[in-house]
Image (spheres, rainbow, N blue to C red):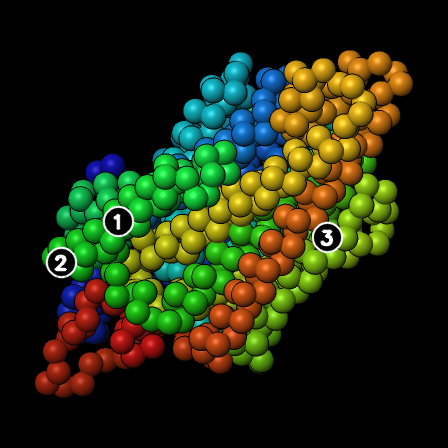
Amino acid sequence: MSGFNKTPQLVVPSRRSRLGTWRRGRAAPAGADRVHARRWAILAVLCLSVLLALIDNTIVNVALPSISRQLHASTSDLQWIVDAYSLVFASLLLVGGSLGDRYGRKGALQAGLAAFAGFSAFAGLSGSTGELIVARCLMGAAAALIFPATLAILTNTFTDAKERAAAVGIWTGITGLGVALGPITGGILLQHFSWSSVFFATIPIAVAALALGAWLVPVSRDPEAPQLDLVGFILSIAGVAAVVYTTIEAPARGWASPVTLAGYGAGLALLAVFAVWERRVSEPMLDITLFRNIRFSAASFSIAVAFFGLFGFIFLITQYFQIVHGYSPLSAGVRTLPFALGVGAAAPAAPVLARRLGIKIVVPAGLILMGAGFFVASTLGSNTAYFGPVLASMVLMAVGLGLVTAPSTGAILAVLPLGKAGVGSAVNDVTRELGGTFGVAVVGAVFSSVYGPQLTQLLHGLGLPAPALAAARQSPAAAVQVAARAPASAHAAIIDAANRAFVAGLSRGSLVCAAVVALGAVFAFLVLPRRLPDTPPNPLTEPEPKPGRRAENPRPDLEGGLSPHRA
């Protein structure tokens, strides 16, 4: 890690260096002008890198039916294949952001991309669900270096308020596109190749991002370079991992079971100890006082609930297309294209709307649109036409997501000091991943609680053997396999029962998503400010201190940022 930064800093020189050298009349570093001139090319590299991490998360959803058939994976196995990535990713984000702040964000990004390529190859070569889950964990660890580094580099590269808002809009638009383009890419690959191709395909993207990043991305890090907060690292990893793991396992063990309650209790206790430690240690990994800022907390919560609904819905809708409607993986992926277009159009426009109407209006409006989309999705049936409620639900969700993420991310960045952009941006990413993980776990549990009993009731009287019925209850894909082996007279009845049970579970899960985002909309409207403050000052053009005043920032922990006590 100590080799992350070998070149002079271009974007974030130390506070004392700026005030003691540049303000004596010397010119800014020569590299600063080059960075400013190529800032949009830098943004393109950052977007490519974040697209890689996000596409890999959603591309797996389209491959779930194929994985279920070829690796004999149950619904629980499929959830773990999706959630193993999120578990490790969320657990290590704060650590990844902190390491980038200390040793260099460019180095963290490059190391993460290289590791991601290698672990993607491991995933593609997996011969069992256990191996695939391990590979997904390792990929999540690599992504934990990539994701916070991209937003931190963006924060330090774009110092003009309007340009930063535009860059954040593009970045968040790409995050939405990554979620939506995964099924399309996976569908194209699965049309011609096996499920392992969805992992091999990400390797060229990682190599391209590595090459372009080495050429274009500037070096930046925390100028204070504090000591590593090893205790904070351990506590944050353990606390987040305990909460995420308990959520993933809760559907199988029971939400009120002693094991689940103990898991949540342990996770919350560890996070509480982490907060106490971070407030007392001289050089904390994360400034806990950021959470006193209601703007920071409300924006983070808005992102969490948006991705709760999104990931929970995507987990089911990709299976709905392939299992209920019988679309091929490619056809299923193409039918998610309106979602990609909706996010791509709404996210860049959201900062402009936020400046005109206010974040207090735009973010709740986005959540309400998402809630409307989930409500429409709850009306889908096994024979619902694509051009109608299905298309309308995805467009509403996509536009809503774009309106939520860009202004909320901007609100979070407005609070962060430039030197702590990595770990601060990781907080934004943790809330996103926690929301998505809870969404898959909760919606998956709601679906299972409806699908199994409904299928048993619909198949009652067919005389299926108990092992066959138990297998059909495991997952919709398993029900299709049971139907293929059943007598011809029972084949159509089993397929019809599985489809009806599936849409019943989809309806209930969609209503849960609608309720969660609706509550998020109310909370955001009540607590978000109407307007955002200006972006933290450009370190190259910061005004001179008044004579006789101390040159140093009285709040060095919030250098260049907005104090949470004044926000």
Residue at the spot x=13%, y=83% of the render?
Answer: 549
User: Mark 1 to mark 3: distance in Å?
Assistant: 37 Å
Q: Secondary structure at mark 1?
A: helix
| Residue labelled with disc 3 | 377
Query: What kind of residue is marked 1?
Result: Ala
How packed mark 1 is, by other alpha carbons closer than 10 Å (few <14, some 14-19, many 20 or more), is some
Q: Label for residue 49?
A: none
Q: Position of residue 30 (x, y in %)?
A: 32, 59
Q: Secondary structure at mark 2?
A: helix
* Residue 114 seen in the current view: no
Q: Earlier in the sequence, mark 1 or mark 3?
A: 1
Residue at the spot x=37%, y=37% of the render?
Answer: 259
Number of the front mark, 2 or 1:
1
Quadrant containing the N terminus in the rendered view: top left
User: Mark 2 to mark 3: distance in Å?
Assistant: 48 Å
Query: What kind of residue is marked 2?
Result: Arg
Q: Earlier in the sequence, mark 2 or mark 1?
A: 1
Residue at the far bottom in the pictured view? 547
